[in-house]
Image (cartoon, rainbow, N blue to C red):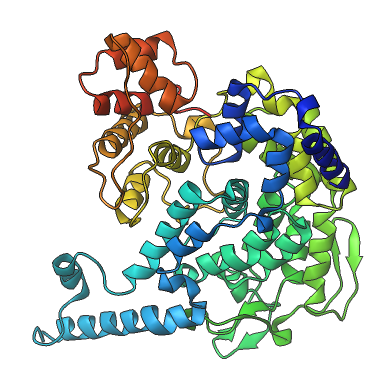
């Protein structure tokens, strides 16, 4: 990274000698490293050059973003700890639910309205709905308005990599804390540090059931306990080595044994992660051929994380996923090897790894341009960004993202959401995207400010369509798109057709 920053400094100092960044390359870079190219971002890239822009984005703490902080400040639930969320919202909600069920079961309709009936009357399940709404709203505000766009892209990538499902019990009160404390601080830092922070976070411990895993025969107040392999399996298959890395079922069992006793004190009360030595398997373990001596405690799990974090298969797995997110669904093998080598040589330094990927020639190669289909959240965010529309409340957009199959924080499987085109390109999904485009451009999307439409200047419908398309796509439209847009009768219809066009679905 030091070499890159030195080169960047020289590039900035001698900008007149640096090759100009052409418009198409600037649009491509903006679409890959932000949640959607805007005219301002493209202009900044062309003015400052890729090296200077990337250097700033790779050091996000130096980028002030007072407007974003002001937008997030009123969302009071974001400042609460998981315990405070439980005590303020979820425990009272559970008490109301039980009281309503008891009254209903006893035939007492007076003074205790059943919760589902109350939800229908009030439009929501109760005050705890605010937590879910602010969770989604802050996500949408960040991806559309943050100046530190590359950081937001990486936070999204890594949360998906270490996915937890906010719909599973108390994970809902831990999900934002996982992102805020275990993922965001590390996306441009150490992979091993992030891996450890996630492994020991209550959201992951509960989601993959490790909080219940104990040495066979150990007992708690709930009775005899046993080994749970869920986290061990996903740690190896998804978080580190990858599915084809050659580990065995025996390795999974040994890893599970190493993490016994990693648990949560009162998860439904928002309690913290703890290590319970009484539930830990203290016998010797062998993981991927390496012996972990008997008599250990929590450090057994940490030793496993050390082993898998520096394994060559992990470097390749991470490099492949990053290249798939930023370059193409089938990234070039040579690129994957080089990015994996940088990951290994830097001890899992993620800033250096991302730099190796983004400065590689394959990243800006012609065949990489428009090679990726936008996921639903990328489509929605890029439309909002180019229309300069602000998110006021995330509820309606959450419903739209749910209809597209991608509500934030609610991917059920440990794999998270797919990063490949075939998951998002069904006919029904594309029709729904067009419906969203119409609602946004016509100012009919609740929770979103009115859009800013570019001028459709020109003496003919074709000229007007071209002007509008250039402003929203930031590049020349295809002949087919131009012909379709030229048939529109109003600027809003033109804008909707452009946002629904094949070019806008790609990045």
Q: Position of residue 42 (x, y in %)?
A: 56, 32
- Relative depth, front residue between 72 and 413: 72
- Is 34 placed left or right of 349 in the picture? left
- 119 to the left or right of 251: left
**Image position of 23 with respect to 89: above or below:** above
Q: Is residue 167 visible?
A: no
- Where on the picture, by quarter, is residue 86? bottom left
Q: With respect to residue 279, does 43 lie above or below? A: above
Residue 402 is situated, as x and y percent measured from the top left of the image, at: 36, 48
User: Is 66 above or below relative to 416?
Assistant: below
| Location of residue 438 in the rendering, given as x and y in whole percent from the top left corner | 27, 33
**In front of the other: 161 or 146:** 146
Looking at the image, residue 313 sits to the left or right of residue 81; the answer is right
Locate residue 491, reporting x and y percent: 26, 25
Residue drawn at point x = 87 percent, y = 47 percent: 2
- Residue 120 visible: yes
| Vertical position of residue 339 compared to residue 237: above or below | above
Q: How many marks?
A: 0
Q: Nearer the viewer, residue 1 or 312?
A: 1
Residue at (70, 23) in percent of width and height: 20
The quarter holding residue 119 reads: bottom left
Which is more toward the observer, 441 or 19?
Answer: 19
- Please tell me which residue is depicted at 16% across the width and 65% down the height of the picture: 120
Q: Which residue shows up at 64% across the image and 87% down it? A: 219
């Amino acid at each position: 990274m030091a070499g890159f920053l030195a080169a960047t400094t020289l590039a900035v100092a001698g900008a007149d000698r640096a090759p100009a960044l052409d418009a198409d390359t600037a649009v491509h870079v903006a679409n890959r490293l932000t949640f959607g190219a805007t005219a301002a971002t493209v202009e900044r890239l062309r003015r400052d050059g890729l090296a200077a822009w990337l250097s700033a984005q790779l050091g996000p703490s130096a980028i002030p973003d007072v407007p974003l902080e002001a937008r997030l400040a009123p969302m009071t639930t974001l400042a609460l700890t998981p315990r405070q969320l439980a005590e303020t919202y979820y425990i009272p909600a559970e008490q109301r639910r039980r009281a309503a069920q008891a009254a209903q079961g006893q035939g007492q309709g007076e003074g205790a309205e059943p919760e589902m009936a109350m939800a229908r009357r009030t439009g929501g399940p109760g005050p705890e709905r605010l937590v879910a709404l602010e969770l989604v709203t802050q996500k949408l505000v960040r991806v559309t308005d943050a100046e530190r766009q590359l950081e937001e892209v990486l936070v999204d990538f890594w949360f998906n990599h270490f996915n937890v499902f906010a719909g599973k019990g108390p994970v809902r009160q831990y999900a934002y804390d996982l992102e805020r404390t275990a993922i965001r601080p590390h996306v441009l830092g150490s992979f091993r540090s992030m891996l450890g922070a996630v492994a020991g976070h209550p959201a992951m411990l509960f989601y993959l059931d490790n909080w219940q895993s104990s040495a066979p025969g150990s007992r708690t107040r709930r009775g005899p306990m046993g080994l749970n392999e869920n986290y061990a399996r996903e740690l190896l298959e998804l978080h580190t080595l990858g599915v084809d890395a050659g580990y065995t079922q025996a390795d999974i069992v040994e890893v599970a044994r190493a993490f016994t006793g990693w648990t949560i004190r009162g998860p439904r009360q928002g309690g913290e992660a703890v290590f319970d030595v009484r539930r830990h398997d203290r016998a010797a373990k062998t993981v991927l051929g390496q012996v972990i001596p008997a008599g250990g405690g929590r450090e057994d799990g940490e030793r496993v994380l050390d082993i898998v974090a520096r394994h060559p298969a992990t470097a390749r797995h991470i490099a492949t996923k990053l290249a798939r997110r930023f370059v193409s669904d089938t990234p070039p093998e040579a690129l994957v090897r080089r990015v994996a080598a940088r990951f290994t040589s830097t001890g899992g330094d993620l800033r250096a790894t991302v730099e190796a990927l983004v400065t590689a020639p394959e990243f800006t190669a012609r065949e990489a341009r428009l090679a990726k289909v936008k996921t639903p959240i990328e489509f929605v965010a890029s439309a909002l960004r180019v229309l300069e529309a602000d998110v006021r409340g995330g509820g309606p957009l959450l419903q739209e993202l749910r209809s597209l199959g991608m509500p934030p924080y609610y991917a059920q499987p440990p794999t998270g959401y797919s990063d490949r085109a075939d998951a998002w390109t069904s006919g029904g999904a594309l029709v729904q995207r067009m419906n969203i485009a119409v609602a946004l451009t016509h100012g009919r999307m609740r929770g979103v400010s009115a859009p800013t439409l570019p001028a459709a200047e020109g003496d003919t419908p074709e000229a007007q369509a071209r002007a509008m398309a250039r402003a929203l796509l930031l590049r020349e439209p295809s002949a087919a798109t131009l012909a379709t847009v030229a048939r529109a009768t109003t600027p809003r219809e033109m804008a909707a057709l452009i946002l629904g066009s094949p070019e806008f679905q790609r990045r």
